[in-house]
């Protein structure tokens, strides 16, 4: 990422008012340009995110989602079917903190369910 070189448009103390004003204008123009560029970058990044999520495969089993790893196999952490966030262990229950969804399986069942689904070799 390029950051505008403020060094070039720095305003010296000795500069007259006209000079100061023109340099300040140049600085504002450079910052406006940078701001516009950053806005475009944010919009582009936001557009990429959902597409990436779609290409990352999930499979549903035992009422939860299992995420496919890019290198093959599946992550051993279950995901929420509603919002696709990772599920956490809360007093033995599997919960999604994002949407308050509770999984039909308990935390202790996860390793067994995972092995039954994908086998030891998938880990
Ligand atoms: Zn959720």
Image (cartoon, grey):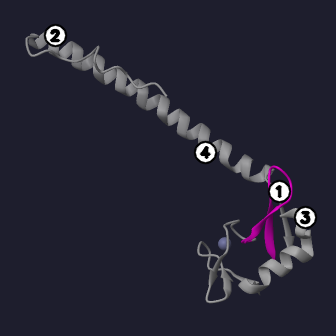
In front: mark 1 or mark 3? 3
Mark-to-mark CA distance, 2 and 1: 59 Å
Question: Mark 2–mark 1 contact, CB under 8 Å?
Answer: no
Q: Name the residue under label 3.
A: 121
* Crowd around label 2: few <14 · some 14–19 · many ≥20 (10 Å): few
In front: mark 2 or mark 3? 3
Say if 80 sits above or below 2 in the image. below
Q: Which of marks 1 and 3 is nearer the N terminus?
A: 1
> What residue is shown at x 79% (from left), y 84% (from top)?
109
Mark-to-mark CA distance, 3 and 4: 36 Å
Q: Mark 1 points at which residue?
A: 57
In front: mark 3 or mark 4? 3
Say if 111 sits above or below 70 in the image. below
Looking at this view, name the residue that lies furthest to the front. Answer: 120
> What residue is shown at x 14% (from left), y 10% (from top)?
18
In front: mark 2 or mark 1? 1
- Is 114 covered by the magenta stretch? no
Mark-to-mark CA distance, 1 and 3: 19 Å
User: Which quarter of the figure has residue 58?
Assistant: bottom right
Q: Earlier in the sequence, mark 4 or mark 1?
A: 4
Q: Number of marks in the image? A: 4
Q: Which of marks 2 and 4 is nearer the N terminus?
A: 2
- Is 74 covered by the magenta stretch? yes
Which element type, helix, strand or loop, lies under badge 4?
helix
Mark-to-mark CA distance, 2 and 4: 41 Å
Q: Earlier in the sequence, mark 2 or mark 3?
A: 2
In front: mark 4 or mark 1? 1
Q: Which residues, given as a range, are shown in magenta?
A: 62-80
Q: Which of marks 3 and 4 is nearer the N terminus?
A: 4
Q: Residue 19 carries which label?
A: 2
């Amino acid at each position: 990422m390029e950051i505008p070189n403020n060094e070039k448009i720095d305003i010296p103390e000795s500069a007259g008012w006209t000079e100061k004003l023109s340099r300040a204008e140049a600085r504002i123009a450079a910052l406006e340009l940078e701001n516009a560029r950053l806005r475009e970058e944010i919009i582009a990044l936001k557009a990429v995110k959902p597409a990436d999520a779609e290409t990352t495969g999930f499979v549903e089993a035992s009422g939860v989602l299992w995420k496919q790893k890019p290198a093959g196999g599946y992550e051993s952490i279950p995901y929420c079917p509603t919002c696709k966030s990772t599920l956490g262990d809360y007093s033995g229950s599997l919960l999604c903190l994002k949407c308050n969804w509770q999984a039909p399986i308990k935390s202790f069942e996860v390793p067994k369910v995972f092995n039954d689904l994908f086998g030891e070799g998938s880990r």
